Image (cartoon, rainbow, N blue to C red):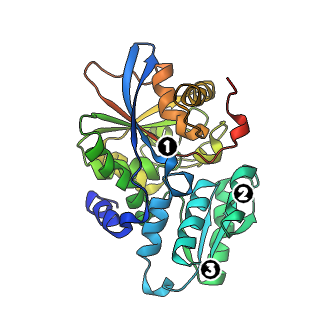
């Protein structure tokens, strides 16, 4: 459903409209000793997360029926911010439907970007139903936060950059919510590097899908639920996982909080909880690199309340 060729096409389409985010090489303390890690700083991307890559790709590749139409998306925050940012760049009207549980900092950002914000339901699935109704009424292009081919392919451009910037990496750790980011990166790398999804134990969409052999509904209860709060893995992510052998690691909320604190304290990286999940896997030992394994990790977003960062 999404291949390396799709990702290459997305990079040609999006081009210089997005930032080529930097890589920071650090050393992290793990139960097995210090581990060098290359951090892909995608939290410095336009809109504060990786998601603008997919939104722009989808809007630039829209079909004739939606050439002049507005866009609508259901989002817990980051995908909506990305869609609103991309729509503003292209002069397209944008409506974002968010669950009532969405963080105030993200809702305020959406409104500041000029999006029409609609609050509906408690979970992403509720917001998606409302977004679908709005899109049908307006004749709008409906984007999906993680399960749309153009969105996944756009996210995959990060994988192409990693292959060029960190050619020595053998494994890439990626946070997982609905699976669009991990699927895009795995499709882009096409077996060149191992890709491992990291998700909270309280939101195990990928882990549960791999165990069941297909996407299944999961309960969500995690400090990272505002970004990793999907209740079901996307079909595209499942397809790519089967084809490329994406791995799965679960981390506890406590480990995510500690990793987020370390990223701020030691490297002055102000990120949201979701972005700290791959680092939590290393710090806690949930993912233990083998001898000679070289790790890269995607720091996926920074749409967070700065007052919640540690003060030391």
- Where in the figure is residue 282, as x and y percent of width and height? 45, 24
How many angstroms separate mark 3 from mark 2 (CA)? Answer: 23 Å
- Where in the figure is residue 292, as x and y percent of width and height? 25, 22
Which mark is first along the chain, 2 or 3? Answer: 2
- Where in the figure is residue 126, as x and y percent of width and height? 69, 59
The residue lying toward the viewer, choosing from 301 and 174, is 301
- From the viewer's perspective, is residue 104 above or below residue 263? below
- Where in the figure is residue 227, as x and y percent of width and height? 60, 47
Residue wearing tag 1: 176
Q: Quadrant of the C terminus?
A: top right
The residue lying toward the viewer, choosing from 112 and 58, is 112
How many angstroms separate mark 2 from mark 1 (CA)? Answer: 22 Å
The local secondary structure at tag 2 comes to helix
The local secondary structure at tag 3 comes to helix
Whether residue 31 appears in this view of the structure is yes
- From the viewer's perspective, is residue 208 above or below residue 27? below
Give the label on residue 136, or none.
Answer: 3
Whether residue 102 appears in this view of the structure is no
Residue found 48% across the figure and 54% down from its top: 234
Q: How many marks?
A: 3
């Amino acid at each position: 459903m999404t291949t390396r060729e799709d990702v290459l096409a997305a990079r040609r389409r999006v081009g210089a409209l997005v930032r080529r985010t930097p890589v920071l090489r650090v050393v992290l303390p793990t139960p097995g000793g210090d581990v060098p890690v290359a951090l892909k700083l995608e939290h410095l991307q336009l809109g504060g997360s990786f998601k603008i890559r997919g939104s722009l790709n989808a809007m630039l590749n829209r079909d004739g029926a939606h050439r002049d139409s507005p866009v609508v998306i259901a989002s817990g925050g980051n995908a909506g911010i990305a869609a609103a940012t991309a729509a503003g760049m292209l002069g397209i009207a944008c409506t974002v439907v968010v669950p009532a549980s969405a963080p105030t900092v993200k809702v305020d950002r959406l409104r500041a970007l000029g999006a029409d914000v609609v609050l509906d339901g408690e979970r992403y699935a509720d917001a998606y139903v409302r977004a679908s109704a709005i899109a049908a009424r307006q004749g709008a292009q409906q984007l999906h936060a993680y399960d749309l081919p153009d969105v996944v392919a756009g996210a995959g451009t990060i994988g192409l950059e990693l292959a060029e910037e960190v050619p020595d990496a053998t494994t890439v750790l990626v946070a997982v919510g609905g699976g669009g980011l991990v699927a895009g990166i795995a499709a882009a790398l096409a077996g060149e590097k191992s890709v491992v999804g990291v998700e909270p134990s309280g939101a195990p969409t990928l882990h549960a899908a791999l165990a069941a052999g297909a996407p299944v509904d999961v309960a969500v209860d995690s400090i990272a639920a505002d970004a990793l709060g999907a209740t079901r893995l996307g079909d595209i992510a499942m397809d790519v996982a089967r084809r490329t052998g994406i791995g799965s690691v679960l981390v506890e909320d406590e480990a995510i909080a500690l990793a987020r604190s370390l990223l701020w304290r030691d490297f002055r990286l102000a990120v949201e909880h979701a972005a700290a999940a791959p680092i939590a896997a290393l710090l806690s030992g949930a993912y233990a690199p083998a001898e000679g394994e070289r790790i890269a990790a995607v720091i996926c977003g920074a749409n967070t309340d700065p007052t919640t960062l540690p003060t030391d």
